[in-house]
C-alpha cells in the first residue's frame, strides 16, 4: 500500500507536470516554424501556468489562484480569435509561409 | 466723463473696423468724413475728460480704467487699462485735436486717389494705436500702441507703394524702428525685474522709494532712450524720418511731425522719476544726443531743395530740442515744446502739402516762388508757422524754445550755445524756405511745357477742406505760447497742470545765473532769431550775399551713404560671419548630435531581426538571467 500511497498525486506532481508542459511549449515556440504550431505551443505554456495556479490554490486554500485561471482562459480565448484571424489572413496571402518568412519589421 | 475714457480709443477703432468692412461701399468722400468724425468724437470725449480732471483737486487727477486682465501669469499681471492723468490727457487732446484737423485736410488732399478709403482706414488705425500708446496704464499697453503706430507708419509711408522709393522708405522706417523697439523691450524687462510690475505707477513709485537701484535705473533709462531715439528720430537712428516724406503729406504732418515722433519724448517724461534716480551722466547723455541731433539736422536743412525734406530735417532738429529739455530735467518744457511744435509743424507740413497740391505735385522749391499771389491763405498761414518755428515773439515756438534753452543753460552753457546756434540756423533755413516758395520771382512758368497735359499750368489755392485746418492751426500757433509764459508763476499753466506727473522743475535751477537773468536770455533769443531771418533775407531775398549750400550738407553729411557703405561692407561681412557661425557651429552641433544617434542606431538596429523566434529566445534568456540574479541576491521565491 505504501506504493499506492506514494502514487497518490501531491501538489508537487502537478507543479512538475506544469513545468514540463511549460518547457515543451517554450521549446516548441523556439524551434518550430509553422505559425499554427507555434500558436499551439503558446497555448500549452498558458495552460501549464494555469495548472500551477490551480494546484497551488488547492494547496494553500486560496481561491484567488483559481479565479486568476478564469481570467487567463477568457483572455486566451480572445487571443485565439485574434491570433487565428491573423494567421489565416497571412496564409491566404502567402500560402505555406513560415514564421521566419514574416520578417518585414527587420531593422 | 471719466467713465467714458475707453471711448477715446474705441471711436477710431470703430472707424477703422467700419472702413475695413464697408470701405469700398462708402468710397469718396464718405469714408473720409466718417474717419474725421470718429477722431473728432474722440476729441470731444477727451475734452470732457479734461474738464472732469480739471474740476478734481490736484491730487485726485488720476483715473485708471481697467477693461480686463490681459496677461495674468504668475507674478506678472498686466491689465488692459487706460490711465487718465494730466500728461496722458494733454497728449490725447493734441493727438485727437490735430488728428481730426489733418483728417479733414486729407479729405481734400487725397481727392481722386484710387485708394481713398484705404488711406483713412490706416489713418484711423494710426490714431487708435497712438491713443493706446499715450493712454496705456502700463508699459505693455504703451508698447502695443508703440508697435501699432510703427506699423501704420510703415503702411502710410509706402502708401503709394508702386513707387519704388516709397516702398523702400517704408521698409527703412520699419527696420530702423525695430532697433529702437529692442531698447523698449529691454527697458520693459529690466523694469519688471527691478520693480516687479509694468504699470507706470508701480515703476515710478519703486524709483521714488529707492527700490530701483541707481545702476538699474540708468540701464532702464538708457534702454528706453534707445527706443525713443528710434521712434523720435534722434542720432544715430534718425535716418528713416527724412525718407518717410515719401508718404502723402497729411501723413507727414500727422505721424512724422505732430504725433508719432513725439512718442519717445512722451515715454521719457512718463518715467521721469526713473531718470531722476539714474546716474547723473544718463540725463547728460540724453541732453547731448538731443542737442547734437538738433544742430546736425539743422545744418542739413540749410541745403535741402525739396520743400518737405526741409521740414523733415527741421522736425528732427526740433525733436532734438525736446530731448535736450528731457536731459536737462525740463520735462514741462519738453511737453510744452511738443505741443507747440505739433501746432506749427503740422501747420507747416499741411501748408507745404497745399503748395504741392496747388503745384500739381511739384516738390522742388527751385521751381516755385511768388506763390503768395496765387495762394494767399496758404502763404499767410505758412508765414505764421514760419514765425512760430523761427522763434519770433509772441508766437508759440518762441516761448517753448526759450524755456528749453533756459534749462539747458542751467545745466551747461555749452548746451545752451549749441542750442542757440541751432535756433539761429532754424530761423535761417525756414526764412530761406519761405522766400523760395512764396516770394521772389515766379519760377514755375518754365514748367508750362512739362505740365502740358494740364493745359495752361497755374498754381491754385486749395479747397476749403484744406485751408480751414490751416487757419485753425495758424491760430493755435499764435496763441499756443500762452499755456506757459515765463513772466510770473501764475502764468505757468502747463506746469501747474502737469504737476501731479512732473515735479516743478524750477527748484532745480533756482539760484543759477540763468534763472536770475532769464530776461537777458529772452532778449538774446529774440536777437538770434531776428539775425537768422535777416541773414537769410540778405542771401535769398536781396541776393546781396552768395548762398552757402555745400554739397556735403545737401547730402546730409553723407550719413546715409556712410551707413549704407558700412552695412554693405564690414556690416555685411559680420552678418555673413554670424550666418556662418549659425550654419557651422549651431547647426553643426544639432546635426552632429543627430548623426551620432543615427550611426549608433545603424548598429543597434541589427538586433531587430524580425524573426519572432529570436525575440522569444530573447525573452527566455531574459527570464533565466533574472532568475539567476534573484537567486544570487538570495531572494526567497
Image: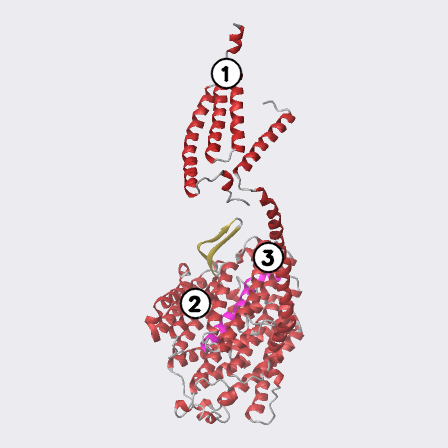
Residue at mark 3: chain? B
Give the quadrant of residue B18.
bottom left
Relative height, residue B563 to residue A16 (above, below): below
Give the quadrant of residue B305.
bottom right
Residue B264 on the magenta segment: yes
Left or right of B260 in this view: B283:
right
Residue A15 on the magenta segment: no
Residue at mark 1: chain? A
Q: Quadrant of the C terminus of chain B?
A: top right
Q: In the image, residue B474 lies at what x, y percent?
A: 46, 79
Q: In the image, residue B542 lies at what x, y percent?
A: 56, 94
The label nearer to you, 3 versus 1, is 1
At label 1, counting other C-alpha atoms closer than 10 Å, the crowd grade (few under 14, some 14-19, many 20 or more) is few
Q: CA distance from mark 3 to mark 2?
A: 30 Å
Give the quadrant of residue B214.
bottom right
- Can residue B491 be seen by looking at this rendering? no
Identify the magenta region.
B249-277
Q: Which mark is residue B190?
A: 3
Please state the total of marks drawn on the protein image: 3
The label nearer to you, 1 versus 2, is 1
Q: Which mark is residue B481?
A: none
Q: Are marks 3 and 1 in contact (CB under 8 Å)?
A: no
Q: Residue at x 51, y 92 (%)?
A: B440
- For the residues tagged 3 and 2, is the chain the same? yes
Relative height, residue B193 to residue A58 (above, below): below
Q: Secondary structure at mark 3?
A: helix
Residue underneath mark 1: A59
Residue underneath mark 2: B125
Amino acid at each position: 500500500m505504501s506504493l499506492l500511497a506514494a502514487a497518490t498525486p501531491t501538489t508537487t506532481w502537478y507543479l512538475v507536470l506544469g513545468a514540463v508542459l511549460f518547457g515543451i511549449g517554450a521549446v516548441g515556440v523556439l524551434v518550430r516554424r509553422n505559425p499554427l504550431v507555434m500558436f499551439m505551443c503558446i497555448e500549452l505554456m498558458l495552460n501549464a501556468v494555469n495548472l500551477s495556479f490551480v494546484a497551488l490554490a488547492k494547496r494553500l486554500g486560496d481561491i484567488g489562484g483559481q479565479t486568476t485561471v478564469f481570467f487567463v482562459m477568457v483572455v486566451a480565448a480572445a487571443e485565439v480569435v485574434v491570433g487565428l484571424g491573423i494567421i489565416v489572413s497571412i496564409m491566404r496571402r502567402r500560402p505555406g509561409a513560415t514564421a521566419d518568412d514574416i520578417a518585414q519589421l527587420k531593422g | 466723463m471719466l467713465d467714458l475714457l475707453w471711448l477715446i480709443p474705441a471711436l477710431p477703432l470703430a472707424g477703422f473696423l467700419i472702413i475695413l468692412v464697408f470701405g469700398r461701399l462708402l468710397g469718396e468722400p464718405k469714408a473720409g468724413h466718417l474717419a474725421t468724425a470718429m477722431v473728432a468724437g474722440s476729441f470731444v470725449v477727451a475734452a470732457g475728460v479734461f474738464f472732469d480732471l480739471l474740476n478734481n483737486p490736484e491730487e485726485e487727477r488720476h483715473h485708471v480704467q481697467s477693461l480686463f486682465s490681459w496677461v495674468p501669469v504668475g507674478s506678472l499681471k498686466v491689465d488692459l487699462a487706460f490711465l487718465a492723468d494730466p500728461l496722458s490727457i494733454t497728449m490725447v487732446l493734441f493727438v485727437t485735436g490735430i488728428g481730426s484737423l489733418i483728417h479733414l485736410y486729407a479729405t481734400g488732399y487725397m481727392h481722386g486717389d484710387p485708394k481713398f478709403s484705404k488711406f483713412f482706414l490706416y489713418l484711423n488705425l494710426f490714431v487708435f494705436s497712438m491713443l493706446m500708446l499715450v493712454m496705456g496704464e502700463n508699459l505693455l499697453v504703451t508698447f502695443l500702441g508703440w508697435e501699432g503706430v510703427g506699423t501704420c507708419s510703415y503702411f502710410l509711408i509706402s502708401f503709394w507703394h508702386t513707387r519704388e522709393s516709397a516702398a523702400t522708405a517704408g521698409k527703412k522706417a520699419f527696420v530702423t524702428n525695430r532697433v529702437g523697439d529692442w531698447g523698449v523691450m529691454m527697458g520693459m524687462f529690466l523694469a519688471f525685474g527691478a520693480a516687479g510690475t509694468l504699470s507706470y505707477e508701480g515703476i515710478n513709485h519703486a524709483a521714488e522709494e529707492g527700490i530701483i537701484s541707481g545702476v538699474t535705473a540708468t540701464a532702464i533709462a538708457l534702454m528706453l532712450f534707445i527706443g525713443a531715439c528710434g521712434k523720435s528720430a534722434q542720432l544715430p537712428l534718425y535716418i528713416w524720418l527724412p525718407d518717410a516724406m515719401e508718404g502723402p503729406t497729411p501723413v507727414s504732418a500727422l505721424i512724422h511731425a505732430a504725433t508719432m515722433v513725439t512718442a519717445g519724448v512722451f515715454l521719457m517724461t512718463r518715467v521721469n522719476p526713473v531718470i531722476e534716480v539714474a546716474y547723473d551722466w544718463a540725463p547728460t547723455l540724453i541732453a547731448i544726443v538731443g542737442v547734437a541731433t538738433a544742430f546736425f539736422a539743422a545744418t542739413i536743412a540749410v541745403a535741402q531743395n525739396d520743400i518737405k525734406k526741409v521740414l523733415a530735417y527741421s522736425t528732427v532738429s526740433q525733436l532734438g530740442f525736446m530731448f535736450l529739455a528731457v536731459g536737462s530735467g525740463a520735462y514741462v518744457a519738453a511737453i510744452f515744446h511738443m505741443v507747440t511744435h505739433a501746432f506749427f509743424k503740422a501747420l507747416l507740413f499741411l501748408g507745404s502739402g497745399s503748395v504741392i497740391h496747388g503745384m500739381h505735385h511739384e516738390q522742388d522749391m527751385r521751381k516755385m516762388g511768388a506763390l503768395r499771389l496765387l495762394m494767399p491763405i496758404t502763404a499767410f498761414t505758412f508765414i505764421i508757422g514760419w514765425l512760430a518755428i523761427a522763434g519770433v515773439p509772441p508766437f508759440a515756438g518762441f516761448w517753448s524754445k526759450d524755456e528749453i534753452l533756459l534749462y539747458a543753460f542751467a545745466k551747461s552753457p555749452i548746451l545752451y550755445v549749441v542750442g542757440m546756434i541751432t535756433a539761429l540756423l532754424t530761423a535761417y533755413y525756414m526764412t530761406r524756405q519761405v522766400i523760395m516758395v512764396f516770394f521772389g520771382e515766379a519760377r514755375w512758368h518754365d514748367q508750362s511745357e512739362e505740365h502740358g497735359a494740364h493745359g495752361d499750368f497755374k498754381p491754385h489755392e486749395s479747397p476749403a477742406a484744406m485751408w480751414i485746418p490751416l487757419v485753425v492751426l495758424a491760430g493755435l500757433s499764435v496763441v499756443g505760447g500762452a499755456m506757459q509764459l515765463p513772466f510770473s508763476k501764475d502764468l505757468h499753466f502747463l506746469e501747474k497742470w502737469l504737476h501731479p506727473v512732473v515735479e516743478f522743475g524750477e527748484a532745480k535751477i533756482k539760484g543759477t545765473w540763468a534763472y536770475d537773468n532769464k530776461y537777458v536770455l529772452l532778449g538774446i533769443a529774440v536777437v538770434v532769431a531776428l539775425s537768422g531771418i535777416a541773414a537769410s533775407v540778405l542771401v535769398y531775398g536781396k541776393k546781396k550775399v552768395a548762398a552757402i549750400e555745400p554739397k556735403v550738407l545737401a547730402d546730409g553729411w553723407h550719413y546715409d551713404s556712410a551707413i549704407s557703405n558700412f552695412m554693405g561692407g564690414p556690416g555685411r561681412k559680420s552678418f555673413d560671419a554670424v550666418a556662418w557661425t549659425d550654419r557651422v557651429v549651431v547647426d553643426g552641433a544639432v546635426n552632429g548630435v543627430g548623426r551620432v544617434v543615427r550611426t549608433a542606431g545603424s548598429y543597434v538596429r541589427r538586433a531587430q531581426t524580425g524573426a519572432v523566434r529570436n525575440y522569444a529566445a530573447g525573452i527566455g534568456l531574459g527570464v533565466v538571467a533574472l532568475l539567476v540574479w534573484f537567486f544570487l541576491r538570495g531572494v526567497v521565491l
